[in-house]
Image: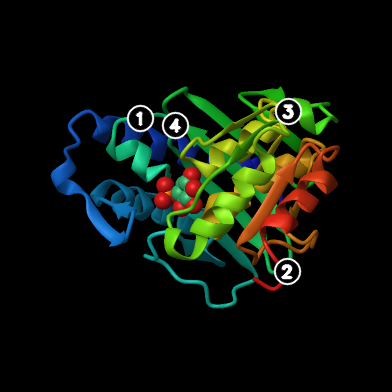
């Protein structure tokens, strides 16, 4: 499989879908929003974007299955699997806030093979493939060199699952606030992780996160010289839901701070 060539095709598909999102945003109204769960929204835009992406990726690699946020396609243990978020940052999108994006990863049973994340708001495409490096619009990405937690610029998203998360979320913010240079929440996990790959943020962490949110961008962090694990340091994170992505230098310290907030076995 020529991963570089395949990545070029996937960039085209992600950018087509991103342009669709931006176009639909122009006349979008709140009446089109449905609630999946408390605080978790969806609209025809997410669903239609997913339909278009699944059709295009199926034509590109018919032997691959799918794991998608809106669940319109299936994974039946095929040798390859596309992991797709057709609109990451839905809450931003419905409120006409940036950023939001399209995220597409390809994985084999064990590993991430390629990742593409397209942000139509800034017209930036982040992409990379296993062993081939990570890029933003043709420029090679490299994680930051910040090694001191007191200087670190972090993203810590708070997931929708507030019932389960509220107390540990409070602890996490409490453990980090005052110890780091700055904390942000972006509303798009996929883009926040890409920003770690690009050296714009030094680290990102989130609990209860979906594979479609992190898979593509996690590979880009690894290809840009950073580190990705689950909250407990496990490197086999691709089925996980509690993920940290850093520039590598801050990884252990951040992981320790997080483990103080999240008791093992949670
Ligand atoms: C969400 C965003 C958000 C993150 C949530 C995700 P969605 O995805 O990535 O930043 O905090 O955990 O579910 O719903 O906008 O596609
Ligand atoms: Ca998402």
Crowdedness of circle 3 by 10 Å Cα count: few (<14), some, many (20+)? many
The disc at residue 97 is 1
- Give the x, y percent position of residue 188: 49, 40
Q: Any atom of ligand 1 within 8 Å of the CB at mark 1?
A: no
Circle 2 residue: 264
- Give the x, y percent position of residue 236: 76, 64
Seen at 60% across and 62% down, the residue is: 241
Determine if residue 86 is in view. no
Q: Residue furthest left?
A: 31
Q: CA distance from mark 1 to mark 4?
A: 6 Å
Seen at 37% across and 53% down, the residue is: 50
> Under tag 4, what secondary structure?
loop
Q: In the picture shown, does residue 102 fall above or below 234?
A: above
Q: CA distance from mark 2 to mark 1?
A: 36 Å
Seen at 13% across and 46% down, the residue is: 31
Q: In the picture shown, does residue 126 fall above or below 243?
A: above
Q: Quadrant of the C terminus?
A: bottom right
Circle 4 residue: 99
Instruction: Choose between 76 and 158: the one closer to the eye.
Output: 158
- Give the x, y percent position of residue 25: 26, 33
Closer to the camera: disc 2 or disc 1? 2
Q: How is the image coloured?
A: rainbow
Q: Earlier in the sequence, mark 4 or mark 3?
A: 4
Number of disc labels: 4
């Amino acid at each position: 499989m020529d991963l570089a060539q395949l990545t070029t095709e996937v960039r085209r598909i992600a950018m087509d879908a991103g342009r669709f999102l931006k176009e639909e945003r122009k006349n979008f109204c709140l009446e089109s929003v449905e609630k999946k769960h408390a605080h978790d929204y969806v609209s025809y835009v997410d669903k239609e974007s997913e339909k278009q992406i699944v059709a295009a990726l199926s034509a590109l690699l018919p032997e691959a299955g799918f794991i998608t946020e809106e669940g319109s396609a299936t994974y039946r243990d095929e040798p390859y699997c596309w992991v797709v978020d057709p609109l990451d940052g839905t809450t931003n999108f419905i409120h006409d806030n940036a950023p939001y994006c399209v995220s597409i990863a390809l994985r084999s049973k064990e590993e991430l093979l390629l990742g593409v994340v397209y942000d139509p708001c800034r017209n930036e495409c982040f992409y990379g493939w296993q062993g081939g490096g990570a890029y933003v619009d043709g420029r090679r990405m490299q994680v930051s060199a910040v090694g001191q937690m007191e200087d670190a610029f972090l993203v810590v998203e708070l997931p929708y699952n507030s019932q389960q998360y509220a107390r540990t979320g409070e602890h996490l913010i409490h453990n980090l606030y005052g110890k780091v240079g700055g904390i942000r929440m972006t509303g798009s996990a996929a883009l926040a992780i890409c920003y770690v790959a690009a050296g714009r943020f030094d680290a990102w962490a989130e609990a209860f996160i979906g594979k479609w949110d992190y898979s593509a961008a996690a590979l880009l962090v690894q290809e840009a010289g950073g580190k990705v694990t689950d909250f407990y340091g496990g490197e086999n994170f691709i089925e996980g839901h509690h993920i940290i992505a850093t520039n590598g230098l801050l990884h252990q310290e951040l992981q320790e701070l997080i483990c103080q907030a999240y008791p093992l076995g949670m």
